[in-house]
Amino acid sequence: MNQSPPVNLFEMERLAESRLSATAFDYYFGGAQDEVTLRENRAAYDRITLYFRILVDVSKRSLETTVLGERVSMPVLIAPTAFHRMAHAEGELASARAAGDAGTIMLVSTLSNTSVEDIAAAATGPLWFQLYIYKDRGATRDLVARVEKAGCTAIVLTVDAPILGPRERDIRNRFTLPDGLTVKNLLGAGQGTVAMEMYGSGLQSYVSNFIDPAISWRDVEWLRGITTLPIVLKGVVRADDARRAVEAGARGIVVSNHGGRQLDTSPATIDALPYVADAVAGRAEVYVDGGIRRGTDVVKALARGARAVMVGRPVLWGLAVDGEPGVARVLEILRNEFDTALALCGCPSVTDVTADLLRPDSKRP
């Protein structure tokens, strides 16, 4: 008897686990240390109540919005995640095609198994590029120039990973990339190999060897000086940092704790979101990632001040299950659930999602 296809993202995750090696699944799924933040990113959404409106004509609905002036079919973007080819041979190529066909944007990771040029050539929609700043500033500068030439339309600078968080699953598994896979974007600079370690995680050694732990606000200014692309800062959970980001010229902010993979017991991103949104006060766009698995989660994030959400792990589950069609199915599930949630909340469009859909006595966690 044929197995029924996944009807939600949790089922997609369970099916992906059965298709992936234990090492690959642990790498994708795992968080830092006791994985408290990993669990809280999800659990925090379940604690939020939606106070739905009634007797609103929702016979016609629009899910569209814009991000940095680019129109997307729904406020769901693909978050940057590394090493897609551990999930499927086509890797980032399949993910980029599925994103474009769904009318949304994929954020390409610095740590892709496929070069930004090849991803851009395969893409059917806009791409943003997630950037780590390397100790080798020449290599970083060259990568930024390549990103611009490839046609990416924004640079998303990760600011919450000066060193790698202690991911104990990877340490136990002595994580490294499978044979034939590299950090393709840095291969030409001699920084494309994640080596096997006698003890511990090869990725932890890679980050320690190559990523700059001295990154500071000066580097945001440096980055602005070498690119004309809009800059988004990813990994903000504090209001004061959000205000400083805007003052430093950031066009967008991603409220993120790196999927619970950096500092364990850092706050759930949906709980940090309203404070960041209030601090930004419309001067930059605010996005959020971490724990989003349902269409109702998207509504809750918008109600707390996000312009759009970003989903990471579910894309990898779809990729592992069925390549490009699997990623397309993940985005279709979220789209359908979000559409349903809008209708049942009495919201004909994204702009009708406002803070009063949450607890009337408190807009804060």
Image (cartoon, rainbow, N blue to C red):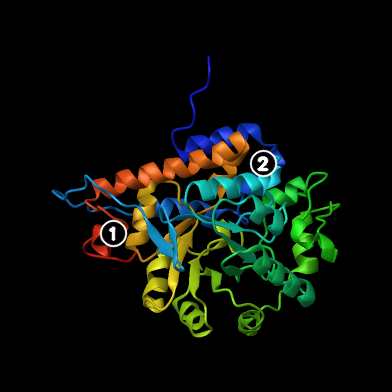
Sequence-first disc among 2 and 1:
2
Tag 1: residue type?
Answer: Val
Circles 2 and 1, Cβ within 8 Å, touching? The answer is: no
Residue 298 point in image, percent of width and height? 39, 53
The image shows residue 12, relative to residue 190, as above or below, that is above
Q: Which mark is residue 144?
A: none
- Residue closest to the eye, 55 or 106: 106
- Residue closest to the eye, 10 or 280: 280
Residue 263 point in image, percent of width and height? 59, 64
The image shows residue 61, relative to residue 261, as above or below, that is above
Q: At 71% from the left edge and 74% from the top edge, which residue is drawn?
A: 213
- How far separated are the C-alphas under marks 2 and 1? 35 Å
Q: Residues within 10 Å of mark 1 (few under 14, many from 20)?
A: many
Residue 316 point in image, percent of width and height? 59, 45
Tag 2: residue type?
Answer: Ala
Q: At 62% from the left edge and 54% from the top edge, which residue is drawn?
A: 81
Q: Circle 2 — which element?
A: loop
From the image, tell me which residue sits under label 2: 87
Residue 268 in sight here: no
Q: How many marks?
A: 2
Left or right placement of residue 363 versus residue 257 in this view: left
From the image, tell me which residue sits under label 1: 353
* Image quarter of residue 134: bottom right
Residue 147 point in image, percent of width and height? 67, 66
Q: At 62% from the left edge and 49% from the top edge, which residue is drawn?
A: 30
